Structure formats: C-alpha cells, structure tokens
Image (spheres, grey):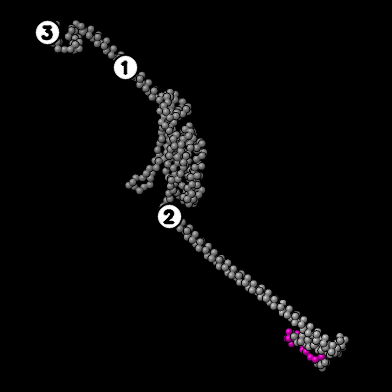
C-alpha cells in the first residue's frame, strides 16, 4: 500500500526472494479464492508426477527381476539341468545363459553324505559322524574326493576290522546322476560299504591286511554297474588304513604266538624225523657197503680157490700123467725082461691101490668097513668066498 515505505525494505533482497515474497506482498484479502485455486492446481500436478515416477520404478524393477530370473551363470566344472514344466529339457554348460522364467526352471538336488568329525583335542572319545546336505542346482562334473567314515566289517574268521577308504569319482552323465538315483552321494556311500563288506567276508583277517590290492580290485570291480546306471566314472579307489580293535589285536597276537609255537614244534619234529631218516639211511648204506665188500671178498676168495683147485687139478693131472708114463715105462721094461713077473707086479700094485682106496672109504664111513685077507675069509664065517675066488679066476 505504501510504496515508499516498502521499497527500501525490499531493496536488500534478491529477485528470487522477491518472487517468493511477491504473492504475500501483492496479494490482497480480496483475492484468496484465486490463491486457493492455484494451490489446488499445483497439488494435482505434483501427485500425477509422483504416480508416474512410482509406476516407472515398478516397471524398471519388474524388468530387472525378469532379467535376473532369465540370467544363469554356470561356474566352470558344473552344469545345470533345466526343466520345462517339471520335465527335463536341457543341460546348461559352464557360461552365461538366458532362460525364459516361469516356464523353465533349474533342477535342484538334495544329496546327503556322512562326514567324520575329528574328536576334540581335550577328549579321548572316538570321532563321531554327522550328515551333511548338498542342496544346489549346480551338478559338479569335475573329479571329486569321497572319504566316508571308517567301515566296520566282519571277516571270514569272525574278526572285526575298521577300514578307511578313499574314492575319487567324476559325474560323466548328469542326467543319469540326477534322475536315475534319488540321492547320489548317499547311494555311493552305501554301495562302498556293501562292496567292502562283501569282499572282506570271503577272506580271513590276515588276507585282508596283507593283500590290500586284492581287496581294492574286488571292490573296484563292484562299481562297474553303478558307473553305467548312475553316470559315474570311478577314477581311483584305495584303502587308507585298516584298524584292529585292541581285544582283537591281543587275540591275534596270542593266535600268532600259538601258531609260531606250533610251527617251531612242527619244524623240530620234522628235523628229528629227517635226522632219524638220515641215520637209518646211513646205517643201510653202511650195511650195504659191508655186504658188497664181503661179497667182493668172498668172490675174490672163491675165484682164488677155484684158481687153486684148477692149478692143483692140473698139477695132479700132470703128476698122474708123469706117474702113468713112468709106470708105463716100468711095465714095458719088466715086460721086456719077464712077462709073468710084470703081470704079478701089476696085480700087486692094483691090490695095494684097492687096499688104499678101501682104507680111505673106511675112514670116511667111520670104521663101518673091516679089511681082512681074502684067503682068511672062510675062517671068519664069510660065505661065498669060493664063489668070489672062482669069479676072480674068471676075470683073470
């Protein structure tokens, strides 16, 4: 209203301040309706802008959510199985993929495995186990290590053992690994327990401890069917350690000591038997040697005796020949001198020879033969002496 009084007061304000204060300074009480109308128009415009901004934000957020749902990043060494309305559709390899949401979804697996927990350092209790859960849509295809807890087995000779094994495997067919078996890790663990127990129940404890390669080979061959049905590839399998309980170890030590004692006793008996056999064999060889020596000696003596007899026979034959020649020469000389004298001499010699032979025969028969003169036979009561004389006369 008073321009002069108001002008100096507004001289110190900026134009923007003047514009803000202008409605207050120039507005009169008569124009209140115009001000209210202008405020209503300003509020309606602000609400429209706010609603537009909120709608744009919701739209952008929805697009981002859909884009996030469509995007799949598969890490290296893993694959993702995609299902379409609950049915298997495809396999996503490592890398970036875009999948239409709502119609397609990733297959999540829930695999459980048993993990052995180490005992507390301050306690002396045995280690316990816990069940771990693998819940993810990522199917690992790289080589993994499976280390189950110690397996309790009973051998053929009823001995209890704790066997620690380690298994390396790789999933070569994710579809079979997910859809052909409900829980791959748990099934693999139970299969390992089964094959180890089956392999140990057919052999003794000593064979299990000393022949680990045979145990590993039998167990490894049992995984062939699982490799084909479950899409696995068992790359390595080995026995880490074999633990024997204290009472079984004590019993095993006692059995081993008893076995060693039996072996020592059996070895001693075998040595004694061999010693006796050697002694008998030595005695037999000595006897045979003596017999052979004796036979050889007797053979030599017999040969020597035969040689002597041959020589004596030859000597006697030679002497007989010489004597016969001498007798023949003597008879020839006597015959040349007197034939009757030669005949008497020959008869006398024959008679002497006969008497000598009779004497020798009497000596052999121990005196059963008595020699008497021929002419005195009748005086001793012998009959037939005349007939004997006549027969001698005839022979002459």
- Viewer-nearest residue: 273 or 387: 387
Is 305 displayed left or right of 243 in the figure? right
Residue 190 appears in the rendering:
no
* Figure disc tally: 3
Q: Within 10 Å of the Cα at label 2, are there few (<14), some (14-19), or many (20+) other Cα atoms?
A: few
Q: Earlier in the sequence, mark 2 or mark 3?
A: 3
Residue 366 lies within the magenta run: yes
Residue stretch rendered in magenta on the structure: 361-374
Label 2, on which residue?
250
Q: Earlier in the sequence, mark 3 or mark 1?
A: 3
- Relative depth, front residue between 350 and 217: 350
**Image location (x, y in percent) of residue 186:** 44, 38
Q: Is the residue 89 above or below the residue 306 in the image?
A: above
Q: Indicate yes or no whether the magenta region holds residue 180.
A: no
Q: Which quarter of the image is occupied by the N terminus?
A: top left
**Which residue is the extreme one toward the bottom?**
379
Instruction: Give the residue at mark 3.
Output: 5
Q: Which residue is mark 1?
A: 53
Distance from Cα at disc 2 to Cα at disc 3: 119 Å
The image shows residue 250, relative to residue 380, as above or below, that is above
Q: Nearer the viewer, residue 260 or 374?
A: 374
Please, what is the dominant secondary structure of the magenta stretch?
loop
Residue shown at the point (48%, 49%) measured from the top left: 211
| Residue at image point 48% right, 41% down | 191
Examine the image and state in which quarter residue 377 appears: bottom right
Count residues near mark 1 (Cα–Cα under 10 Å), then give few for <14, some for 14-19, many for 20+. Answer: few
x then y, percent, for residue 278: 55, 66
Residue under the point 51% across and 39% down: 224
The reply to whether the C-beta atoms of the residues labelled 1 and 2 are less than 8 Å apart is no
Q: Circle 1 — which element?
A: helix
Question: Element under label 3?
Answer: helix
> Tags 3 and 1 in contact by the CB under 8 Å rule?
no
């Amino acid at each position: 209203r008073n321009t002069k009084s108001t002008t100096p007061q507004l001289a110190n304000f900026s134009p923007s301040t003047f514009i803000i204060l202008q409605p207050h300074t120039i507005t009169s009480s008569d124009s209140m309706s115009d001000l209210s109308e202008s405020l209503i128009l300003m509020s309606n415009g602000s609400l429209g802008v706010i609603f537009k901004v909120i709608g744009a934000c919701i739209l952008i957020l929805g697009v981002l959510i859909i884009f996030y749902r469509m995007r799949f990043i598969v890490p290296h060494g893993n694959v993702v199985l995609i299902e379409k309305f609950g049915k298997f559709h495809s396999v996503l390899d490592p890398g970036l993929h875009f999948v239409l949401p709502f119609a397609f979804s990733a297959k999540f697996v829930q695999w459980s495995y048993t993990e052995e927990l180490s005992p507390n350092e301050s306690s002396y209790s045995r280690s316990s186990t816990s069940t771990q859960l693998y819940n993810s849509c990522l199917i690992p295809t790289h080589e993994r290590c499976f280390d189950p807890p110690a397996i309790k087995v009973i051998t053929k000779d009823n001995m209890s053992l704790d066997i620690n094994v380690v298994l390396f495997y790789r999933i070569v067919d994710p579809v079979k690994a997910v859809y052909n078996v409900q829980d791959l890790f748990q099934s693999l663990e139970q299969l390992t327990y089964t094959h180890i127990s089956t392999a140990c129940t057919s052999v003794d404890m000593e064979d299990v401890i000393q022949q680990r390669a045979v145990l590993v080979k039998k167990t490894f061959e049992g995984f062939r069917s699982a490799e084909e049905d479950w899409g696995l590839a068992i790359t390595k399998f080995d026995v880490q350690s074999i633990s024997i309980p204290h009472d079984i170890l004590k019993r095993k030590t006692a059995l081993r000591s008893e076995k060693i004692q039996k072996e020592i006793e059996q070895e001693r008996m075998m040595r004694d038997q061999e010693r006796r056999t050697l002694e008998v064999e030595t005695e037999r060889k000595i006897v045979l040697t003596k017999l052979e020596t004796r036979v050889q000696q007797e053979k030599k003596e017999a040969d020597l005796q035969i040689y002597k007899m041959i020589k004596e026979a030859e000597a006697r034959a030679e002497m007989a020949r010489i004597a016969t020649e001498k007798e023949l020469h003597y008879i020839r000389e006597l015959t040349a001198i007197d034939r009757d004298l030669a005949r008497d001499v020959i008869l006398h010699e024959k008679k002497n020879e006969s008497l000598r032979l009779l004497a020798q025969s009497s000596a052999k028969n121990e005196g059963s033969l008595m020699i008497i003169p021929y002419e005195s036979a009748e005086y001793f009561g012998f009959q037939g002496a005349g007939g004997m004389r006549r027969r001698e006369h005839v022979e002459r």
